[in-house]
Amino acid sequence: MILVVGLGNPGDRYADTRHNIGFRVVEKLLGKGGSAHGQERFSGSFTSIDLAGERVGILRPLTYMNLSGSSVQAAMSFYKLGLEELLVVHDELDIGFGELRLKLGGGDGGHRGIRSITERLGSDAYARLRVGIGRPPPDFRGDAAAFVLEAFSLAERAGAETLVDRAAGAVELFVESGLAKAMNATNQRPKR
């Protein structure tokens, strides 16, 4: 099994925020693979689907972002998965809005969900799909934490839907072809 984890925060208050784009990507995958509703397991919502001919576990931790690692660790322990069988999908401030980057390992860049997962697994050697939400605009009143907890602007919404579709496609490619091929295809900047 490959475990695909979409990061976000539970509840209606966070549903459309930038920080929840990981949830939106895995929900798109659930729509393709069958049920959009998972069972409550591993302190999250978990569903097993067939994707690109492979068995894939889709996990949305419901622990709030900062404690995502406990949910991921529980699922990985239950299914006896190695780090190479994990892909985490999350929002990324340091990548321009609309861009995707697939990578293996590295620091958390201040992302508390990634920090929690790395701490609980004892390693950062797992794949991540970083979904670019960009930095706050110069006129934004507030810090980065406030920015990620806001909804996409009206001007960004169509682009956000396209981004979710492309990210779901990148996950499918990862499942079907592996990390190296998926990185080559995904890490190209979109044509403007």
Image: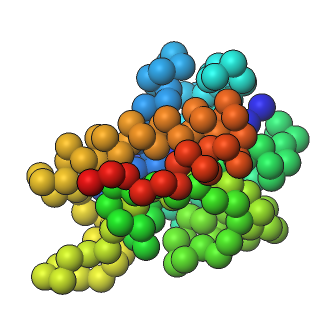
Comparing 136 with 12, the one in front is 136
Q: Where residue 138 sits in the image (x, y, percent)?
A: 18, 83
Asked which quadrant contains residue 51, the reply is: top right
Comparing 6 with 74, the one in front is 6
From the viewer's perspective, tell me whether residue 156 is left or right of residue 6.
left
At 58% from the left and 55% from the top, the residue drawn is 102
Picture quarter with the N terminus: top right
Asked which quadrant contains residue 161, the reply is: top left
The number of numbered discs placed on residues in the rendered structure image is 0
At 20% from the left and 43% from the top, the residue drawn is 158
| Residue at the limit of the structure toward the front, as seen here | 191
Comparing 7 with 157, the one in front is 157
Comparing 47 with 168, the one in front is 168
From the viewer's perspective, tell me whether residue 46 is left or right of residue 167.
right
Q: Where residue 84 sits in the image (x, y, percent)?
A: 80, 49
Residue 89 visible somewhere in the drawing: no
Q: Is residue 32 above or below residue 122?
A: above
At 64% from the left and 22% from the top, the residue drawn is 52
From the viewer's perspective, tell me whether residue 153 is left or right of residue 125.
left
Picture quarter with the C terminus: bottom left
Q: Is residue 64 above or below residue 179?
A: below
Q: Where residue 100 sits in the image (x, y, percent)?
A: 46, 55
Q: Coloured how? A: rainbow
Q: Where residue 47 sits in the image (x, y, percent)?
A: 61, 28
Residue 93 visible somewhere in the drawing: yes
Asked which quadrant contains residue 81, the reply is: top right
